[in-house]
């Protein structure tokens, strides 16, 4: 599915990973996040290898992701979906037993931080709603807010605007640009080429498991290999 694939994602950039269906894009995400292991080659994050780490360890290193299919907890509130992603000292039995005051303070701080993320994506007024009662586009925004609550530095977004209407697509674009301005690094998979060209600093094109072109959106639009991959000879 992926072979001889070699690219980098620069800090504080929005990088788009594009290509025809079956090009290996989601497999690359699965490799980076440890859901599957590579047969050969290496994956580095901030100069350190992460090949041998399992998914939760990779998340703790500062990489978080969304999926093609929304994976929220539908019967929990919007706020609770975010709080579940927060690392809590309250998970430690002895801290819970001997420092109840600290736990209350931490819970309050976590809620305030999660509310900041909900405000960023425009869902603060939905914080007490069940996730299942949000619109499809709002659920996409909630997924972004949830990975923000992990405090990750690198955000991997798998088709963030797939199936959303033009108004919501523009809202998600503005959220990503805002995140970049706040220092986040984003690697996204997307088939909406207009969206990609309007948001990405760099575009990586894959075909048959390999990257076939890397450049700015304008360079990619005029690349003969890219046109061939999408349109045929």
Image (tube, helix red, strand yellow):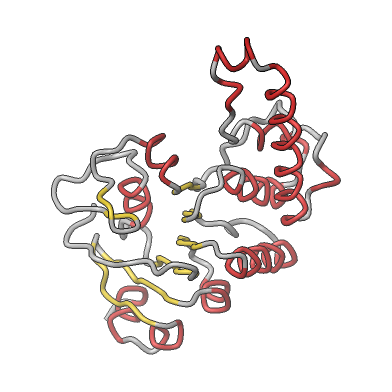
- Quadrant hosting residue 8: bottom left
**What is the count of numbered marks?**
0
Q: Is residue 100 above or below residue 87?
A: above
- Residue at the image position 58 percent from the left and 26 percent from the top: 89
**Residue closest to the eye, 144 or 10:** 10
Residue furthest to the top: 97
- Quadrant hosting residue 72: top right
Q: Is residue 69 above or below residue 179?
A: above
Q: Is residue 52 above or below residue 192?
A: above
- Residue at the image position 59 percent from the left and 29 percent from the top: 88
- Residue at the image position 50 percent from the left and 74 percent from the top: 200
- Quadrant hosting residue 149: top right
Residue 221 as seen in the image, left or right of residue 106 = left
Residue 55 as seen in the image, left or right of residue 183 = left
Q: Report x, y in % for residue 213.
A: 30, 77
Q: Report x, y in % for residue 27.
A: 32, 50
Q: Which part of the image, by quadrant, shows the C terminus?
A: bottom left
Q: Is residue 8 above or below residue 104?
A: below
Residue 96 as seen in the image, left or right of residue 214 = right
**Residue closest to the eye, 26 or 116:** 116
**Residue closest to the eye, 191 or 216:** 216
**Residue closest to the eye, 84 or 142:** 84
Q: Report x, y in % for residue 93.
A: 55, 13
Q: Report x, y in % for residue 184.
A: 54, 61
Residue furthest to the left: 40
């Amino acid at each position: 599915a992926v072979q001889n694939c070699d690219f980098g994602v620069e800090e504080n950039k929005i990088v788009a990973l594009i290509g025809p269906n079956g090009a290996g894009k989601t497999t690359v995400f699965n490799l980076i996040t440890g859901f599957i292991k590579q047969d050969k080659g290496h994956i580095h994050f901030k100069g350190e290898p992460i090949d041998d780490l399992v998914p939760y360890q990779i998340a703790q290193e500062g990489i978080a992701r969304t999926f093609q299919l929304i994976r929220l907890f539908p019967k929990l509130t919007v706020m609770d979906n975010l709080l579940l992603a927060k690392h809590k000292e309250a998970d430690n039995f002895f801290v819970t037993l001997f420092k109840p005051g600290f736990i209350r303070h931490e819970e309050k701080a976590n809620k305030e931080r999660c509310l900041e993320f909900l405000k960023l994506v425009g869902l603060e007024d939905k914080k007490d709603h069940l996730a299942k009662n949000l619109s499809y586009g709002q659920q996409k925004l909630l997924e972004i807010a949830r990975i923000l609550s992990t405090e990750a530095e690198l955000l991997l977004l798998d088709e963030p605007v797939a199936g959303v209407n033009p108004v919501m697509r523009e809202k998600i674009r503005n959220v990503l640009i805002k995140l970049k301005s706040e220092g986040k690094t984003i690697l996204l998979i997307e088939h909406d080429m207009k969206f990609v060209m309007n948001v990405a600093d760099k575009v990586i094109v894959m075909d048959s498991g390999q990257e076939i072109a890397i450049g700015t959106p304008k360079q990619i639009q005029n690349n003969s290999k890219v046109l061939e991959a999408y349109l045929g000879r």
